[in-house]
């Protein structure tokens, strides 16, 4: 047992952070300028998308734990969401894809040739994957998806749909017949949130990932995505904490740096505690996903719920600590506030995940009671 | 990162489980509970601690030469997990094990280690902590209790306050002033005082919860052999900082986490069994949200502690992370008891031994007790100052 990262894992996180820092527009004030397509290529050249791909398919064969700090860096650097969603899709294809899917997709994922967007939510259905109405029929897949990050720049869409009455995942090419995409007006334009309309959309050959309704594919996707989003949220929170501390050390009022005032100092301390606690939850969840540990779903929900709340609170505090500067467009803190809101509501917000924790806890307790009675 | 356990660690867990199955009182947690009476409860806890020791389950990660088990910090974490799993009773000599022992192990002379450590582990000696004084709480370096050297003795005069478990203690470690003319941090020493020495008197103080766990302790010309100083004369502040690092650190937090997770499990069980308006209280979505948030926060207490253990094992020094751990658990636990009262709703005010009190009244008592968490071991404000200044580098 060792709850620490090794040197390679740390250095991977630092490398991704350094790369993203070369693209200042990513975190600059204007979200419209924050979708530079060159970022994708730079991350691909770095080999980020090869990391989770097994060696047999041209990748490095690492696990989600190995990339946890890199994912934190994606969050901190406000990387294009398609980077994270491609990593999540890779995890699913590696774990649940057919041999043919793996052979055709993974080598192209590894080189950065395939960008994959995750099309999950539907209008009026909440977060629950079981509520999905999009359906696969004889002539393709039909339904309407909302809030699909970076769908407009993706090559493939991984679509949650009803297949013979059960829920499963389907691969659809973005440029396939019957796919139309509309950009949402949204709180964080840099997330590229889209509505995707599937009107008998043509499926890729062998489009079904895993088996619909049986197996672990949809729960795994929900967990992996929740964990990756939690990791990104912690990257953002840590960066905002640093920004607050730096500002509190330099901004002078009443003849002293505001960080000397306890009302500011103590908020910074509370943020530091929240960031460390959130990291504990997120890192453990990464491990449960890497090992497919029985505790995975509970850990994923804890991480997603808690880290989402932490990132939200830390972003709010950071704006407050920066005073009037914090409220300016120019300083760009709003970019983090906006992205945090998108992450908070992607793949289940805290309310949804806390409920899931309750279900898991009561189920575990019932098992325990039964064991005791026996 | 790896949360799986080595065969050796699995064996440790299996041995402990097997031992616990025999050692706990028959019916423990189902029909048999701790005594209600405070003194009886203290003796029950002491007996349990001694039983743990006789089974070889004391001082898990202390060196074997001083009576410990010589195990790793990971095994210490496994120990905590297993104790939580069976809802084991807590001990009485926590201050001895976690604070006095750790401090002596780090800074004591060989003679002190040889004499005191085995007696702490066996809980033959119960310890109390004589740091706070009426005018030195958060400002601990202001202590005024005097210790004057006369030959091979110190003569101690003064008053301590909030001394927990002094009534059960054989020994007290105290921060005393040995040089009144030096700057306040520089004139302090760390003394080990035999509580049976003539001139010591204690007076119980009643707490919010109605209990009398802590006391006022008076020293009137108390003689303490010079051999009972830990560290050098006037070097007491440095020694006391070690004590505080352990008091606030992951070892202490993990022990508490056991109890919080036990209480939380009881709370979930109680709520699951409580009818509310023709349905079950557990089906109320707001109740579920509050419970799940506490379940998450209490789990994070454990993860924080284990993560910090790993930092130490991987070569990092103990630093301000103790304050992170303390600040986190104290508020998370307080939130949990506040949530418990919210959840119980109209019956929340009904306390033990009223037959209508939920969960036997334990949540009401714990709620009251939890108000101390953010005060003792350094108040939250002090922890925030430490984190702000020493970890984040903010100006004083
Ligand atoms: C249940 C319990 C058990 C205890 N057991 C022991 C024991 O066994 N041995 C022992 O030695 N002590 C013990 N203590 C004492 C405990 O350590 C002190 O109560 C604590 O350090 C606070 O000191 P104080 O009570 O003097 O409060 P004060 O120092 O007077 O503080 C009052 C308030 O002012 C705030 N404050 C003080 N200074 C600052 C500052 N610089 N910045 C911002 N806010 C500040 C505090 O945070 C607090 O909110 C115990 C206390 C309790 C409640």
Image (cartoon, rainbow, N blue to C red):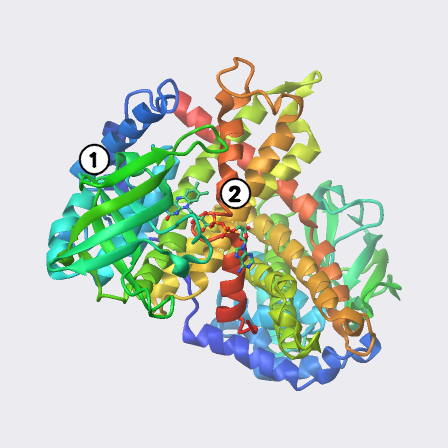
Instruction: Give the answer, above or below, for where A355 lies relative to B386.
Output: above
Left or right, B120 with reference to B27: left
Which element carries disc 2, helix, strand or loop? helix
Q: Which residue is mark 1?
A: B50
Q: Which residue is mark 2?
A: B333
Quadrant of the rendering where the N terminus of chain A is positioned: bottom left
Point out residue A337 in the picture as x, y percentages from the top left corner: 75, 65
Point out residue A172 in the picture as x, y percentages from the top left corner: 75, 62
Chain for disc number 2:
B
Quadrant of the rendering where the C terminus of chain A is positioned: top left
How many marks do you count on the picture? 2
Q: Is the residue marked 2 within 8 Å of ligand 1, measured from its CB?
A: no
**In percent of the image, x 42 and y 38: which residue is there?**
B259
Displayed quadrant of residue B111: bottom left
Q: Is residue B114 visible?
A: yes
Q: Is residue B91 visible?
A: no
- Comparing B393 with B65, the one in front is B393
Left or right, A66 with reference to A312: left
Q: Are marks 1 and 2 on the same chain?
A: yes
Mark 2 nearby-residue class (10 Å; few <14, some 14–19, many ≥20): many
Left or right, A92 with reference to B21: right
Point out residue B342 in the picture as x, y percentages from the top left corner: 64, 32
Displayed quadrant of residue A26: bottom right
Q: CA distance from mark 1 to mark 2?
A: 28 Å
Chain for disc number 1:
B
- Comparing A119 with A278, the one in front is A278
Point out residue A120 in the picture as x, y percentages from the top left corner: 74, 54
Displayed quadrant of residue A94: bottom right
């Amino acid at each position: 047992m060792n709850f620490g990262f090794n040197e390679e894992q740390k250095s991977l996180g630092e490398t991704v952070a350094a790369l993203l820092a070369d693209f200042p527009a990513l975190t600059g004030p204007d979200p419209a300028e924050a979708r530079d397509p060159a970022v994708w290529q730079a991350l691909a050249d770095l080999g980020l998308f090869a990391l989770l791909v097994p060696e047999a398919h041209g990748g490095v064969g690492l696990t989600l734990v190995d990339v946890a700090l890199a994912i934190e860096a994606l969050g901190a650097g406000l990387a294009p969401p398609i980077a994270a969603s491609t990593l999540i899709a890779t995890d699913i294809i590696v774990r649940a894809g057919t041999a043919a899917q793996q052979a055709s997709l993974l080598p192209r994922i590894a080189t950065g040739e395939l960008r994959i967007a995750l099309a999950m939510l539907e209008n009026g259905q909440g977060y629950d994957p079981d509520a999905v109405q999009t359906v696969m029929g004889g002539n393709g897949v039909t339904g309407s998806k909302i809030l699909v990050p970076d769908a407009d720049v993706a090559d493939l869409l991984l679509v949650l749909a009803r297949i013979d009455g059960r829920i499963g995942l389907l691969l659809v090419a973005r440029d396939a017949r019957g796919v139309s995409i509309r950009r949402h007006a949204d709180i964080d334009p840099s997330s590229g949130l889209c509505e995707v309309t599937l009107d008998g959309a043509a499926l890729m050959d062998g489009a079904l990932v895993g088996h619909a309704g049986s197996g672990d594919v949809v729960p795994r996707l929900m967990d992996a995505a929740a964990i990756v989003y939690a990791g990104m949220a912690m990257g953002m929170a840590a960066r905002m904490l640093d920004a607050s501390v730096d500002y509190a050390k330099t901004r002078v009022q009443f003849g002293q740096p505001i960080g000397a005032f306890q009302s500011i100092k103590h908020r910074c301390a509370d943020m530091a505690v929240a960031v460390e606690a959130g990291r504990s939850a997120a890192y453990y969840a990464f491990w449960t996903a890497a090992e497919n540990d029985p505790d995975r779903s509970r850990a994923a929900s804890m991480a997603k719920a808690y880290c989402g709340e932490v990132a939200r609170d830390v972003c709010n505090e950071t704006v407050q600590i920066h005073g009037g500067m914090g409220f300016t467009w120019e300083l760009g803190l709003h970019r983090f506030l906006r992205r945090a809101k998108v992450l908070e509501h992607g793949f289940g917000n805290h309310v949804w995940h806390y409920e899931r924790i309750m279900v898991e806890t009561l189920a575990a307790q019932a098992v325990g009671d039964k064991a005791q009675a026996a | 990162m790896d949360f799986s356990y080595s065969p050796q660690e699995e064996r440790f867990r299996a041995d402990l489980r097997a031992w616990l199955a025999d050692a706990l009182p028959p019916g423990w947690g189902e029909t048999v509970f701790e005594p209600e009476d405070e003194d009886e409860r203290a003796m029950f806890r002491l007996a349990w601690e001694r039983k743990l020791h006789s089974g070889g389950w004391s001082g898990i990660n202390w060196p074997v030469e001083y009576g410990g088990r010589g195990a790793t910090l990971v095994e210490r974490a496994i120990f905590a997990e297993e104790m939580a799993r069976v809802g084991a009773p807590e001990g009485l000599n926590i201050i001895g094990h976690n604070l006095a022992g750790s401090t002596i192990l780090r800074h004591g002379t060989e003679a002190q280690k040889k004499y005191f450590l085995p007696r702490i582990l066996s809980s033959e000696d119960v310890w109390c902590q004589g740091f706070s004084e009426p005018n030195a709480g958060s400002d601990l370096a202001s202590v005024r209790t005097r210790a004057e050297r006369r030959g091979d003795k110190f003569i101690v005069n003064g008053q301590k306050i909030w001394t927990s478990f002094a009534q059960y203690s054989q020994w007290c470690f105290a921060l005393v002033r040995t040089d009144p003319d030096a700057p306040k941090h520089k004139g302090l020493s760390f003394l080990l005082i035999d509580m049976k020495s003539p001139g010591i008197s204690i007076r119980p103080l009643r707490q919010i919860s109605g209990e009398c766990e802590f006391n006022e302790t008076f020293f009137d010309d108390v003689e303490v052999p010079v051999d009972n100083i830990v560290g050098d004369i006037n070097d007491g502040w440095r020694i006391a900082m070690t004590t505080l690092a352990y008091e606030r650190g992951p070892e202490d937090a993990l022990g508490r986490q056991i109890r919080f997770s036990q209480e939380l499990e009881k709370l979930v069980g109680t709520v699951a069994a409580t009818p509310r308006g023709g349905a079950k209280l557990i089906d109320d979505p707001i109740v579920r949200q509050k419970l799940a948030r506490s379940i998450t926060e209490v789990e994070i207490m454990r993860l924080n502690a284990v993560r910090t253990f790993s930092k130490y094992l991987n070569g990092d020094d103990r630093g301000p992370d103790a304050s992170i751990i303390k600040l986190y658990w104290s508020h998370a636990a307080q939130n949990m008891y506040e949530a418990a009262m919210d959840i119980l709703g109209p019956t929340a005010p009904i306390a033990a031994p009223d037959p209508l009190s939920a969960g036997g009244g334990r949540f009401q008592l714990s709620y009251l007790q939890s108000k101390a968490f953010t005060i003792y071991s350094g108040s939250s404000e002090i922890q925030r100052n430490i984190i702000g200044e020493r970890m984040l580098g903010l100006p004083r």
